[in-house]
Amino acid sequence: MEPANYYLAIVEDKPVILDALLAYFSSSPNFNPILAAESAEQFIESWQEQRIDLLLCDISLRGKSGVEIAWYAKRKSSTTQVVMFTMFDNKETVFQALCAGASDYLLKNTPLPQVEARLLEVLRGGSAMSPQVARMILGHFNALANDAVGIGGEQLTPRETEIISLLQKGGGYRQVAEQLSISVATVKFHIRNVYGKLQLNSRDGLVGKYGWMG
């Protein structure tokens, strides 16, 4: 596959980590880092009309959080993919970021070549769903199913649950498609529906909690 030159933005408040990311991706044939910021406020001020294909964002920032940046980025540019970068596997915060529109998340101890591979997967596959994300989504909808009151959102269909369960076990889109005797396009269709349900279920609660939409 030919190298792609995706426009990358990075928000990271630790200079050592930010410098390492910039050095790595500046030498990559797949990415062109066009914007780097150490805070949400600096990122918002710096992002004018530049096209950003992917935003890699620290989830725990001083000031406005990575969750708030995810909201802002997806409202400003719906085609921009957002991937969260986190030191700890904080499920509540990561799940809030996914509800805000993030496609995936990565731990900061992930080797840089693996970071690049995951970012490319997100960009080339629309919304790549890692096993970690699949576990969170299943947990979220299972909790709703067990809650007599719930929050009035849609539930996963049996097929959606089946696909998410297979992804949770580490299968890729093609493996899942072969196992279920459906096309990869059909798998991606169901994944898009799952993400849509996730955001619809959580949008009002998140807006109420953070009170900041850009």
Image (cartoon, helix red, strand yellow):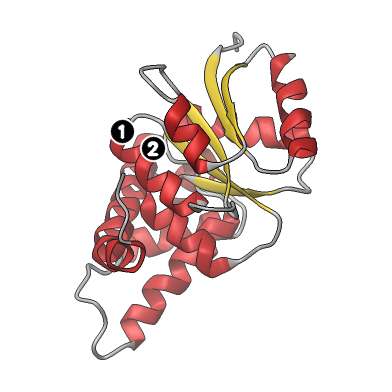
| Disc on res. 205 | none
From the viewer's side, name the closer residue of 142 and 89: 89
Name the quarter where the C terminus is drawn.
top left
Name the side, left or right, on which 190 lies relative to 94. left
Name the quarter where the N terminus is drawn.
top right
Secondary structure under tag 2 reads helix
Name the side, left or right, on which 99 lies relative to 116. left
* One can see residue 165 in this view: no
From the viewer's side, name the closer residue of 150 and 141: 150
How far apart are the alpha carbons under marks 2 and 1?
5 Å
Give percent across and percent down for residue 199: 30, 56
Judged from this view, the residue extending furthest toward the bottom is 148
Name the side, left or right, on which 67 lies relative to 153. right
Label 2 amino acid?
Ala
Looking at the image, which residue is at 56% across and 67% down? Answer: 91
Name the side, left or right, on which 184 lies relative to 88. left
Mark 2 nearby-residue class (10 Å; few <14, some 14–19, many ≥20): many
Mark 1 nearby-residue class (10 Å; few <14, some 14–19, many ≥20): few
Looking at the image, which residue is at 47% across and 73% down? Answer: 139
Label 1 amino acid?
Lys
Secondary structure under tag 1 reads helix
Is 140 above or below relative to 118?
below
| Disc on res. 76 | 1
Q: Which residue is mark 2?
A: 73
Residues at badges 2 and 1 in contact (C-beta under 8 Å)? yes
Looking at the image, which residue is at 49% across and 33% down? Answer: 43
* One can see residue 63 in this view: yes
Give percent across and percent down for residue 176: 49, 48
* Residue 119: quarter of image: top right
Is 170 above or below relative to 82?
below
Is 129 above or below relative to 51?
below
